[in-house]
Image (cartoon, helix red, strand yellow):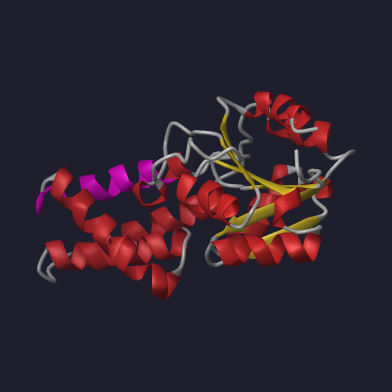
Amino acid sequence: MAQKLTTIGFDADDTLWHNERFFRVTQDRFADLLADYTDRDHLEERLLAAEKRNLGHYGFGIKGFVLSMIETAIEVTEEKVPATVIAELMAAGRDMLRHPIELLPHAREAIEALAPQYRILLITKGDLLDQERKLAQSGLGDFFDGVEIVSHKTTATYADIFARHGEGANQSMMVGNSLRSDVIPAIEAGGWGIYVPHDLTWALEQATPPRENSRFAEISSLADLHDIVRNLR
């Protein structure tokens, strides 16, 4: 290994704790509310288009998701959506914001095993208040040497974070369930990218795994992370 690993960053949503499944439940509720106006497949396409279009305005997270649902409801009903439906969507968003945190298998064990030897960071994107709430409820906060809640995860984002919190990206690793946000830009910055697939991944986070890159690895769960790190020594 050309450089010694000193710093490990972890994604939060669907890497350390469940998140996407709550979006799917709310999206099913959304489809039921608008069943009289359009079919489910068409609605999903319109909602995804709205989410993609609105990322630059609202960012990632529950609030932007709710606003995109409301916008989509207005569009597919040709501005005839009942106020009761809008109220239901807002209530669904509040339910999501109140949902208790449930850690994914091996999340705590993985961090506990690595924290004594490495600088551990949480690098997540989304709404500031919601991510702070989830971190506080997770019980993992004391393990992190730094917490970064960012608007976007880009190559420049990782280069900056790993420079400020460590010895640079080439001595750092990012662990996450999103190829597009967690793995590929971290590798492009010069670090290692460890992909931990999740059964539910938002369409806008999907990408082709860079399997030819020597700094890429895929593991089935966080239980395998310690072995990956140990083999880098």
User: In this rendering, does residue 160 appear at all?
Assistant: yes
Is residue 226 positioned above or below 121 on the image? above
Tell me the residue at 42%/41% (across/down): 201
Furthest-right residue in this view: 116
Q: Is the magenta stretch mostly helix, strand or loop?
A: helix
Which one is in front, 41 or 74? 41
Apparent side of residue 217 relative to residue 83 in the rendered image (left or right): right
Residue 17 position in % (x across, y down)? 60, 40
Apparent side of residue 53 relative to residue 6 in the rendered image (left or right): left
Furthest-front residue in this view: 2
Residue 62 position in % (x across, y down)? 46, 58
Is residue 195 positioned above or below 231 on the image? below
Magenta stretch contains residue 61: no
- The N terminus: image quadrant: top right
Which one is in front, 131 or 228? 228
Furthest-bottom residue in this view: 57
Residue 31 position in % (x across, y down)? 22, 47
Apparent side of residue 2 relative to residue 153 in the rendered image (left or right): right
User: In this rendering, does residue 150 appear at all?
Assistant: no
Residue 93 position in % (x across, y down)? 43, 57
Magenta residues (range)? 23-38
Q: How many labels does the image show?
A: 0
Tell me the residue at 68%/33% (across/down): 107
Magenta stretch contains residue 35: yes
Tell me the residue at 33%/58% (across/down): 89
